[in-house]
Image (tube, grey):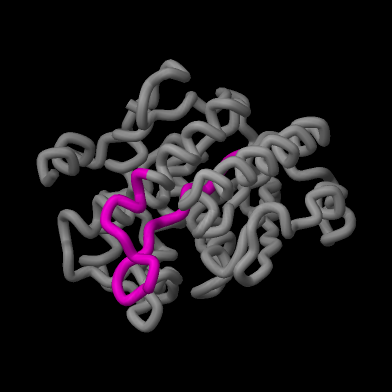
């Protein structure tokens, strides 16, 4: 696995994402070249809300990397604790003026509930609801992306080895069936744990919610996916609370994960 990281990070070189077939297992369609990311809405639950909210971390990374876009950015987050997709009033949210944004969102990122990929029934419901929401997003003039959640770890009572396989296949199928981008956050967690098993990406008390390092990794994956640009070298470290070692490691993991996912 270390060779994967080395392959993508020699001299901090950017990666290239190429088109893939809908039938390619474990991959996802290439995002359109004209993806606009100045007005983004994040829709999900506490996975996004924890640790000062994912959208804030992503925004700070974008402002550092693209300082000329700083005044253009309008990133919003709508979260409901423990929610599934069906619990969100997407019609209300897509009328952006309802939540203080003058123009409609260019991109909406949907994060499903952590249990939605775990049974045949819940996977079917997730697929049906995602299809409806993605259709409405596109009708509003925006594009849709799916935030692939991470798997549980111990001591969560539903922890099970291989959970990420169900998550991955669920999100890839829904993304491909609806021509929506998939952001492979869950796969980045898996890679990080394989290479550095002692890193703490989850809250230790429950094994489900992300720790600050988990949220930081997720933000790097979102950044790398949306902007097709490596986060390696970004100095943002949540106001000096993330060590240089962890910052550099998680930036590399995010870049390697995205490159491998879109290979």
Q: Is residue 19 visible?
A: no
The secondary structure that most of the magenta stretch takes on is loop
Q: Quadrant of residue 99?
A: bottom right
Q: Which residues are magenta?
A: 145-165
Q: Residue at x 81, y 31 (%)?
A: 139
Q: Is residue 80 left or right of residue 17?
A: right
Q: Is residue 119 left or right of residue 237?
A: right
- In the picture, the quarter occupied by the C terminus is top left
Q: Residue at x 53, y 27 (%)?
A: 176
Give the farthest residue toward the bottom.
205
- In the picture, the quarter occupied by the N terminus is top left
Q: Is residue 162 left or right of residue 173?
A: left
Q: Quadrant of residue 83?
A: bottom right
Q: Is residue 29 above or below residue 67?
A: above
- Of 70 and 245, nearer the camera is 245
Q: Residue at x 37, y 73 (%)?
A: 156
């Amino acid at each position: 696995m270390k060779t994967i990281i080395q392959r993508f990070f020699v001299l901090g070189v950017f990666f290239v994402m190429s088109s893939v077939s809908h039938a390619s297992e474990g991959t996802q369609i290439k995002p359109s070249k004209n993806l606009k990311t100045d007005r983004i809405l994040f829709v999900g639950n506490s996975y996004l809300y924890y640790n000062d909210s994912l959208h804030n971390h992503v925004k700070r990374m974008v402002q550092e990397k693209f300082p000329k876009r700083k005044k253009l950015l309008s990133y919003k987050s709508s979260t409901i604790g423990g929610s599934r997709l069906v619990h969100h009033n997407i019609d209300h949210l897509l009328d952006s003026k309802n939540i203080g944004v003058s123009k409609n969102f260019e991109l909406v990122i949907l994060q499903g509930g952590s249990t939605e990929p775990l049974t045949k029934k819940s996977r079917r419901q997730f697929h049906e609801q995602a299809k409806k929401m993605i259709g409405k997003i596109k009708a509003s003039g925006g594009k849709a992306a799916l935030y692939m959640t991470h798997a549980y770890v111990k001591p969560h009572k539903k922890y099970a080895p291989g959970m990420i396989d169900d998550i991955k296949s669920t999100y890839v199928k829904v993304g491909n069936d609806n021509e929506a981008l998939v952001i492979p956050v869950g796969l980045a967690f898996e890679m990080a744990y394989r290479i550095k098993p002692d890193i703490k990406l989850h809250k230790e008390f429950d094994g489900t919610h992300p720790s600050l390092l988990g949220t930081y990794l997720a933000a790097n994956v979102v950044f790398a996916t949306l902007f097709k640009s490596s986060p390696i070298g970004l100095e943002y470290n949540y106001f000096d609370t993330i060590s240089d070692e962890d910052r550099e490691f998680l930036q590399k993991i995010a870049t390697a994960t995205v490159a491998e996912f879109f290979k």
